[in-house]
Amino acid sequence: MDNLTALLEGFSTVLHPVYLLYALFGVFVGTAVGVLPGIGPAMAIALLLPLTYSLEPTAALIVFAGIYYGGMYGGSTTSILLNTPGESASIVTAIEGNRMARAGRGAAALATAAIGSFVAGTLATVALTFLAPVVARWAVRLGEPDYFALMVVAFVTVGALLGSSVPRGLAALALGLFLGLVGTDTLTGQQRFTFGVPNLADGIDVVVVAVGLFAVGEAVYVGSRMRHGPVHVIPVEKGWRTWMKRDDWRRSWKPWLRGAAIGFPVGTIPAGGADVATFLSYASERRLAGPRRKEFGKGAIEGVAGPEAANNAAASGVLVPLLTLGLPTTATAAIIIVAFQSYGIRPGPLLLQSESALVWALIASLYVGNLMLVVLNLPLVGMWVKVLRIPRHYLYAGILLFGALGSYALNFSPVDVLLLVLIGLVGFFMRRYGYPVAPLVVGMILGPMAEDRLRRSLAISQGDLTYLVTSPFAATAYAAIVLLLVAGLWLRRRERAAEVPQEQSPETP
């Protein structure tokens, strides 16, 4: 009952007209950036971080939550109409969704994606409402070695399971850990890796790194691969009667529920996230299709409904370790942690006690944002189609401009702009040669926290290293690392098997 009371208080905050406008703005911007290829929610939140410092924390986090949910859905529009996923989690949607659009059923594909996102997102938010306080109460009892073990789990799984290869993921993680060490050592007061530059004494601002990687690096990478000529978008048939027929509803509702059941738990584990959830959902729907299995690869609506539901459910699942343990398991979650830290708020087991009103307003905004998402996207499909036709050179020039202005506004220092350019070039080469950027951001954020936990543990044990592994939870966590790595390799094999139909499909005209 305490959870329900706190949730009702959160609704009383979010339903204020001003906060409703913030939620609407976040969902609208999130969908808009999700629609555009190469621009995901992580980039949008990174760009808006410096511009929202004038907002109060509740308003800013409601905006970011709307961008997060809207961006997760927006990629489906690009996948279905352009066969170019805006987010990696939308790759599976392109397999069946684009086939449906070519067959004149693009409206049905978009409708099942929007409604499935609403159903699964709402169910997953309900699970978040009741699960987060339980996890937080359990996490309060953990000791310093236990938290260090949790961070090691996050390092190993995020570094090893994200990206095209384990060595590249670990290399990106190591670079992030190095950037997190730049600055002044809090214990000794000595400067580390500053190379005599006074501006680096306080460390490298995470916002500069986030904007450099996700905005500058992404814009330069997409610009280097930009195709010339007009963008060919499959037209969408008009009229609400073309959205979903009775047979479409009958074939979609079970995949929606199964997608929610798969997406939420997968989203809560390190290195899970929406990518793994969507591939698992697609594989499950294909296996359970029975006689309709032959339609997969040719435009099966189940192949759109299930993965899109899993996509949004995983977005809620990611918030469980983020809010209760302070562990970001995806790139977007890492940027949201930066948003918390910019307001002096530290996510973790005490967050529900110290910032109860803020957390419950954020959770309530997810319910409201889900409803806004389905109301916005079904009638405004025609507008999103027009957004897809924006000339890319105008779009990415604007992204670079806003990124530079936002980084300069942090400390009004030209050094931050120079760092932005350098990190942007690093981001470009990482994308160019297949190095994932998420482990870098996670390493930079969690690195200083892990160092602090390790030093406290060694101070308590007077340097006894066995203290780090003798705790029952810590020992279990290290054993879980092995299991997660094995499971991750197995899931990657499943993903590659699910990608086969897409590889066999003809190129978009």
Image (cartoon, rainbow, N blue to C red):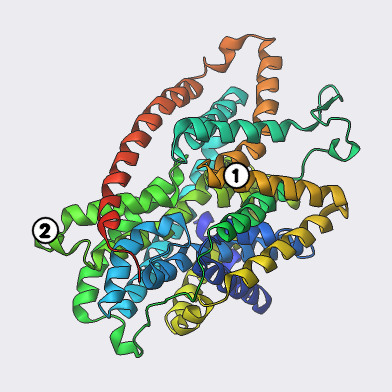
Give residue 429's mark.
1
Do the residues under discs 2 and 1 have CB atoms within 8 angstroms?
no
Secondary structure found at label 1: helix
**Looking at the picture, how far across and down is residue 397, in whole percent?**
68, 67
- On the image, which quarter does residue 198 sit in? top right
User: In the figure, is residue 265 to the left or right of 293?
Assistant: right
The vertical placement of 473 against 222, above or below, is: above
User: In the figure, is residue 490 to the left or right of 192?
Assistant: left
Which of the two discs, 2 and 1, labels the residue nearer the N terminus?
2
Three-letter amino acid code of the residue under disc 2: Gly
- On the image, which quarter does residue 61 sit in? bottom right
The vertical placement of 215 against 15, above or below, is: above
Three-letter amino acid code of the residue under disc 1: Phe
User: In the figure, is residue 280 to the left or right of 379?
Assistant: left
Give residue 290's mark.
2
Tell me, yes or no, if residue 359 can be seen here. no
**Looking at the picture, how far across and down is residue 41, in whole percent?**
56, 60
For this rendering, which residue is in front, 398 or 353?
398
